[in-house]
Amino acid sequence: MTHIVEMKGMNKYFGKLHVLKDIDLTVEKGEVVVIIGASGSGKSTLIRCVNGLEEYESGNLVVDGHALAPKGGNQKNLNEIRKEVGMVFQQFNLFPHLTVKKNIMLAPMKVKNTAETVAKATAERLLERVGIGNQADKYPSQLSGGQQQRVAIARALAMEPRLMLFDEPTSALDPEMIGEVLDVMRELAKEGMTMMVVTHEMGFAREVADRVIYIHEGQIVEQGKPDDVFDNPQSERTQAFLSRVLGH
Amino acid sequence: MEFQFQFDWQSAIDSIPFLLKGIPYTLLISFGGLLIGFALGILFGLLSINKKWFLRWPATAYIEIFRGTPILVQVLFIFYGLPDLVGGPIDPITAGIAAIALNSGAYISEVVRGGVQSIAKGQTEAGLSLGLSRTQTFWSIIWPQAFRRMIPPLGNQAIVSIKDTSLFSVIGVGELVRQGQIYIANTFTAFEVYFVVAILYLAITLSLSLMLRMLERRGLGSV
């Protein structure tokens, strides 16, 4: 099976507000999908549905072969899905009471019963990989924003996910730190990780994405190869959005 | 005759050995009660933020009742009232410990609730997204952070409860104030004796404050 995410006719409401409207979307294994759109368009909500941080009201959602029921349904697959899907948040959400290394070791040890020595070795290897091997024993608050977000990526990778979700991973960063986080993501994409990325970094989207999806008011308005979407947008809404963010 | 008052240092000093006999009771009742109160506080504090109404409502009722009535009434009720119900006398020390436990438990419930709710939602989301269960997320991520924030208000409650035990002289527990009353009945040196009693309370509460400050300072580096 090559579909890792399959959404069919998915609808999501916040009270009366219809935030996702009949979403049909499949993501293939190894694909990098970048989701763009104005704030409040539903793009974060969309990826938060994939690991069940948001429940949807109707439709179908299958993640890596596990069906995830709508709100009120049987959620027995939820933990299986979460073990296989990593997530990186806008606000990093590192655990402030644990050292960087312990942040990364926690989930493998608790969820997969990984031995401490193995978890530690993995943590050190991953920190090396995201370029901060020398910060392992510091607490998150002692690191810069960019470093914290790289730890958050390493923490998610420690569970050996089959899919990574990025929810505006650079939006809370100072401009000079955005690059270091995008570099790590770029590497990850190159190594074949399946990724769903919500971002405002259009340069990154154009360069790294296999597919760009534009969401407007809870609907997928346009999708395609980055060059097509950015250079030759078909929908007027996409054109208007791109001219605003790209400053044409 | 001209009125002249002189603080009688000798009677103050003489009263100390007799007053000190009250301290073990004061400490036993306050710390025994607080220990149980802490357990009650964790239990009812967590229940009071549970999604299920049939768990939340009883917890809220307990908190409101024991926070909203005076501890003196509570201990009188336990000591004089409850024996009618259980059909036998209740030992004053037990009654005192029970009153501190139930009373501080209600306040500590609120401390626990506030502490847990003060932890950002993103922490829970991060735990869940890594595959941890709700229980694992709570005990390994939320609780350790919440507990650190709870230390100052818990210390506050401990000090309040220690002082509350002074009320239990009314049910005849031989704690600090009761010892003072007995001593004064023989010597009529109220000023000196209550002065010493106050100093002894201050000694207990100040040492506790000091210990808590050290504990807080040690925890600071990591949060």
Image: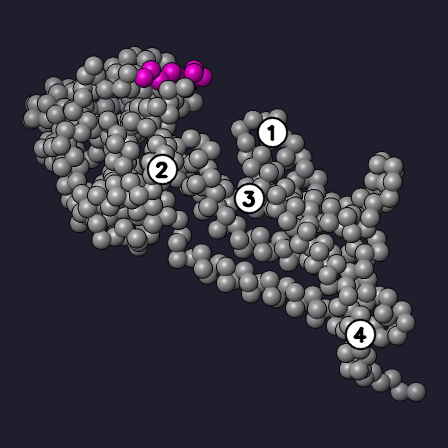
Residue ID for mark 3: B112
Q: Is residue A66 above or below residue A138?
A: above
Q: Which secondary structure, mark 1?
A: helix
Q: Which secondary structure, mark 4?
A: helix
Of mark 3 and mark 1, the one earlier in the sequence is 1
**Label 3 packing within 10 angstroms: few (<14), some (14-19), many (20+):** many
Residue ID for mark 1: B55
Percent across and percent down for residue A25 are 23, 17
Spatial CA span between label 3 and label 4: 41 Å
> At 56% from the left edge and 26% from the top edge, which residue is drawn?
B52
Whether tag 3 and tag 4 are in contact, CB under 8 A, the answer is no
Percent across and percent down for residue B199 are 70, 71
Which circle marks residue B15 in the picture? 4
Q: Nearer the viewer, mark 3 or mark 2?
A: 2
Spatial CA span between label 4 and label 2: 59 Å
Spatial CA span between label 3 and label 1: 16 Å
**Label 2 packing within 10 angstroms: few (<14), some (14-19), many (20+):** some
Name the kind of residue labelled 2 in the image.
Met
Could you tell me which chain the residue with mark 4 belongs to? B
> At 30% from the left edge and 53% from the top edge, which residue is drawn?
A137
Spatial CA span between label 4 and label 1: 51 Å
Place residue B27 in its image quadrant: bottom right
Spatial CA span between label 3 and label 2: 27 Å
